[in-house]
Amino acid sequence: MTNEILFPGDTLGIIGESPNGIMLAETAKKMGFKVIAYSSNEGSPTVQEADLGIIGSYQDRGKLQDFAERCAVVTYVSDQIPAEIIGFLQRFTRVPQGKDALEIAQDRLLERAFLEQLNINIAPYATIVSLDDVYQAVSSIGYPCIIKPIQKEFGHRYQQLIAKQSDIARCADFIDRGTFVLEAWIPFKYEISALVVKDDQGNLQPFPLVENHYRQRRLFETSVGGEFDSAVKAEINKLANEIAKNLHYVGALEIAFFITESGAIYVKKIVPTLHPTGYVFDRGANVSMFEQHIKALAKMPLEPADLLQPTIMVKLQTADLEALRTQWVLKTNWHYRFYRYPKMAQQQTVGYLLVSGNNLLELQQQIDATGIWQDSGATKNN
C-alpha cells in the first residue's frame, strides 16, 4: 500500500456497475494510466474498455483482494456498492474516496443526522418502524409527505406519497420490511446541484452550479450556464463547501438542493461519487468531471473549473433513437455519447446528448422544437 502520487503507467482500479465507469476508464487511459475493472458482468462496457477485467461478485473476497493488490488506487463509480466492500478493499490498496461518506449517503437517517450536525436545512422528518408511527408523525409533519426506506439501495420501491389520511393504509404492504423515514414533501420551484471535487489535502474545487429536471423520477435533463439569484447561488456554494469539507472523502461528489418559491434552500441528497449531472461539463466546462476526479485520486493539482459555454445534457432512451436520426444529420452543435452496453437497444437509458451554444434559452428551444422529448410525464422528484 502506498500514498505516492500516481504517474503514467500506474494502475487505476474501477469498481461499481455504472455507465460512469467506461468514461472514467477512457479518461484514465488518455492520461497514461492502466485500468483494471472489477465487475460481475464480462459484457460491462467498463470491462471492455479496461486493460484488464476481473469478473466476480462482491461476495468473492479472493477476487476482490486480487483486484485490489493489482491496483495503486481503486475508485468506485456507483453509490450503490456496499460500503463494507470498500472497507475490505482498503485493507489491500488505497481507496481515496473511503467508505465513511458512502455509509452516510446510503442511509437516509445517517445522512440526515450528518446534515443536522452541520445545522443545514433539510425537510422535516420522522423515523418510522410501524404503521402507527406514520399516523402519529403525519399529525406534526402534515400533508403531503412521503415515506421512504432508510436504505437508498431500494430506489423508489417501498415509497409512498401520502397526500391524505387514506393513503397511509397503502403503507401496510411494505412497512414491516424495515426502518423508514417519513418526510415533508417540499414544494420546490427548481432543483440545483453543486458538484465539488476534493483533494487529499482538503482543498475544494467546485464546478459551476447546474439545474436539473426529472421525468418519472429519473434525471432527464441538466443545464449549465443559466442565471441564478445571486443570494441563492452564494448560499448553495457555501453549504456545498461546508458539506464537502466535513466529509471524509476525496474525489468528485454531487450535492442536490431544492429551492422553493420563497428562496428557501433544502438539501435533497449527497452522492459521494461521479454523478450524471456532471456529464454536462464534457462540453460546458474547461475540464471534465472525470478528469478532475482522477486528478484528485492521483494527487495532481486540481484545475479551476470554469464555464466554457452554456450546455444542456439530455439523457437518451432507447425510444429516442429512431427520431434522433434526423437530428444526427442536421445539428452541428449536438454531441452524442453512448454507453456501449451489449445489445444497447434493450437498455432503457443508452447515453446522453450535449447541446452547446451561446444562449441557454435558445438551446432549450432548439431541443423542444424537435418534438422528440414531449413532456409526457414531468414529475417533481423529492
Image: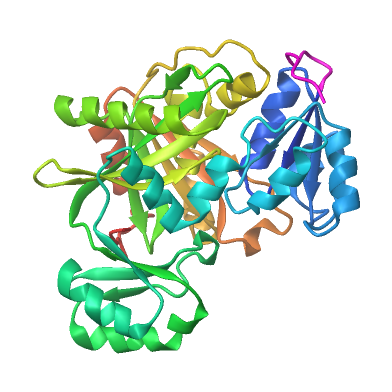
Q: Residue at x 53, y 31 (%)?
A: 252
Residue 144 drawn in magenta: no
Q: Residue at x 30, y 69 (%)?
A: 146
The spot of residue 380 in percent (x, y) is: 28, 59
Image quadrant assignment for residue 27: top right
Horizontal side of 61 relative to 363 (left or right) equals right
- The residue closer to the viewer here, 339 or 157, is 157
Q: How is the image coloured?
A: rainbow
Q: Which residues are magenta?
A: 1-10
Horizontal side of 161 relative to 13 (left or right) equals left
Residue 7 drawn in magenta: yes
Q: Residue at x 47, y 48 (%)?
A: 315
- The residue closer to the viewer here, 330 or 179, is 179
Q: Is residue 155 above or below residue 160?
A: above
Q: Main secondary structure of the magenta part?
A: loop
The spot of residue 179 in percent (x, y) is: 46, 71
